[in-house]
Amino acid sequence: LAQDYPARPVKVMIPFPPGGPTDVLARLVAQKLTESMGQPFVVENRPGGTGTIASGAVSKSAPDGYTLLVASTSSHISPYLLRNSGIDPMKDFTAVANLATLPFYYVINPQVPAQSLQEFVALAKQKPGSLNFASPGSGSGGHLCTEMFMRATGVKMTHIPYKGAAPAVQGLIGGETQFICDSISTSHPHVKSGKLLPIAVSSSKRANALPDVATFIENGVADFEANSWVGLLAPVKTPRSIILQINQELNAILNDPEVKEKLNGMGITASPGSAENFAAEINRDFVKYGSVVKAAGIKAE
């Protein structure tokens, strides 16, 4: 089967609106796959339903490699957020390849009277619940990593969900909110321009995009790490030969120095590797972030 694949265009669905980090990454990868595999890999955005609209469409597609899903940590935990989603992401999909690892920036509006993580935590504790934090939506990666932040530091803030990462960042810039946990790729241009101030990064090591921003561990918050994966999935029972072929093509793309440099410039770290390793990471994060959803009582809106 792999020798004849792809013989026609391949549809790549994204469960998020255009313009966010997952969308940007997916379009770059789809273009590279189009060039290397000789058939169009056509990106289609189907946001909504906490990721279940796109996920549902792909899960019901023929397992032939012609309908794929670019998913993320947040879109893959729908069973914790929706009781009757009709999707079991752990059973309905096969891992193809991890595309990237996205650490989060913890960012504030510069008008907030704080210049560091410690100062912001102290300010928030003085007025519990009076500061607002933005997210791309309830149950999103930005929401979950803020819940982790509040639990680790004892801070309480009010959640203001937006419909996507781009409007959430604009809400922060406009002063509607004071704080956001955001992927580096979305907030990075505004950090560089001085419109936003980063106070910490969620990864265990400093991010290449902004090496001056300290980690939580460096700020004295022990064992704190929150990253999001973005990867390619196929409907379960997709032939193994096709999975391996796409995985091999993607690893070649992600190891390309020019692609790596472009992604690094957006704060995205390419994560080439086997489908098996990606499946193991999905399993770990499903449990990890599921516990955050349960502890915080998060429900999809």
Image (cartoon, rainbow, N blue to C red):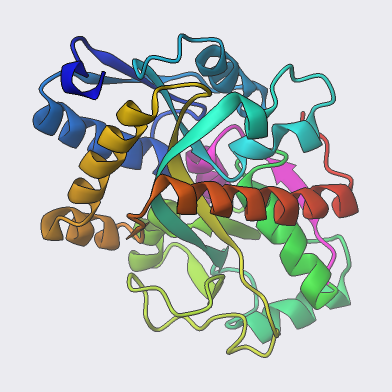
Side of 221 relative to 74 (left or right): right
Place of residue 281 in the rendered image (x, y in percent of width and height, measured from the top left): 56, 54
Side of 276 relative to 267 (left or right): right
Q: Across the whole image, how many numbered discs are drawn on residues?
A: 0
The residue under the point 82% across, 68% down is 151
Place of residue 69 in the rendered image (x, y in percent of width and height, measured from the top left): 45, 27
The residue under the point 34% across, 66% down is 192
Q: Is residue 250 or residue 237 the one in the foreground?
A: 237
Quadrant placement of the C terminus: top right
Q: Is residue 86 visible?
A: yes
Q: Is residue 177 visible?
A: no
Place of residue 83 in the rendered image (x, y in percent of width and height, measured from the top left): 85, 25
Q: Is residue 289 or residue 5 the one in the foreground?
A: 5
Magenta residues span 155-174
The residue under the point 56% across, 52% down is 280
- Tell me, yes or no, whether the highlighted magenta stretch contains residue 97: no
Classify 108 as above or below 296: below
